Image (cartoon, rainbow, N blue to C red):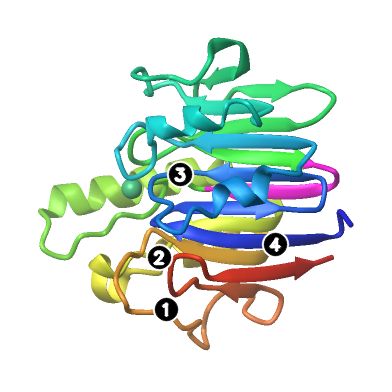
């Protein structure tokens, strides 16, 4: 059934998203429980995505799955230890790739690399990579303003984007500002299922009462590597 999607948390911003027919693996970095292999084994199509070159978002080990991989979508800043060339698509900012299996669009990030917007069998999926409102409390006034402006500028280009599943950072290192990016994203786009990520602490985010469109958005915050979540549509 392609109307049910299962999400498995790997670590940091790494996830497996799968239906009966296909699997997508995002920002593979650690897979301590070896969850990727069984998830992709019997799939007709398998797609890997890496949003940027940081070690905790791109692990060259994804090349070891090339026998099963349909395609690798990598950000333009990833230059080292690439998977097989005939299966790899390098995406610049604001690029669209389309074939008869999948549509992938890239947006710019506020950090390195890109974000992904994907359409597959009617599913609309967004993975933010490191795109976020990185408001670091102790930072200089200039840097704080730079982070806000960069974020708002990029978000304008996503205005009213509709997604069934959106992976977005809610990072506890930002302390009480950990969800300001997710709030703005939820206010300016239309998200059905929000999956929080980029939080390796044990502090789990609870949706605040004043979160934008709280009643229309279902939220999942994974707690540990291997944690899973089912989405039906
Ligand atoms: Zn990151």
Q: Earlier in the sequence, mark 4 or mark 1?
A: 4
Specify whether tag 3 is near ligand 1 (CB below 8 Å): no
Question: Residue 218 at x, y = what percent?
Answer: 66, 75
Say which residue appears at 85% left-offset and 47% top-offset.
122
* Part of the protein shown in magenta: 120-127
Residue, disc 3: 28
Q: CA distance from mark 4 to mark 1?
A: 21 Å
Specify whether tag 2 is near ligand 1 (CB below 8 Å): no
Picture disc at residue 205: 1
Q: Pick the residue in front: 215 or 37.
A: 37
Q: Is residue 71 shown above or below 49?
A: above
Any part of residue 189 in sight: no
Question: Residue 211 at x, y = what percent?
Answer: 53, 78
Say which residue appears at 70% left-offset and 54% top-offset.
163
Query: What is the quadrant of residue 7 in the picture?
Result: bottom right
Q: Pick the residue in front: 191 or 48.
A: 48
Q: Earlier in the sequence, mark 4 or mark 3?
A: 4
Q: Earlier in the sequence, mark 2 or mark 1?
A: 2
Indicate the quadrant containing the C terminus: top left, top right, bottom left or bottom right.
bottom right
Say which residue appears at 10% left-offset and 63% top-offset.
138
């Amino acid at each position: 059934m392609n109307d049910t999607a299962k999400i498995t948390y790997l670590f940091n911003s790494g996830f497996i998203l799968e239906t009966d027919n296909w699997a997508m693996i995002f920002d593979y970095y650690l897979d301590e429980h070896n969850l990727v292999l069984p998830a992709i084994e019997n799939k007709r199509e398998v797609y890997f995505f890496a949003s940027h070159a940081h070690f905790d978002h791109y692990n060259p080990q994804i090349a070891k799955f090339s026998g099963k991989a349909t395609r690798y979508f990598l950000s333009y800043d990833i230059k080292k230890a690439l998977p097989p060339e005939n299966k790899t698509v390098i995406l610049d900012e604001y690029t669209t790739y389309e074939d008869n299996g999948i549509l992938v669009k890239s947006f710019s990030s506020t950090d390195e690399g890109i974000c992904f917007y994907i359409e597959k069998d009617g599913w609309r999926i967004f993975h933010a990579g490191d795109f976020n409102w990185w408001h670091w409390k102790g930072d200089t006034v200039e840097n704080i303003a730079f982070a806000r402006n960069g974020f708002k500028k990029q978000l304008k280009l996503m205005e009213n984007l509709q997604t069934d599943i959106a992976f977005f950072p809610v990072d506890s290192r930002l302390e009480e500002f950990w969800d300001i990016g997710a709030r703005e994203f939820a206010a300016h786009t239309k998200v059905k299922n929000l999956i929080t990520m980029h939080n390796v602490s044990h502090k789990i985010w609870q949706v605040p009462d004043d979160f934008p469109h709280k009643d229309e958005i279902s939220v999942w915050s994974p707690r540990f590597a291997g944690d899973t979540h089912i989405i039906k549509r």
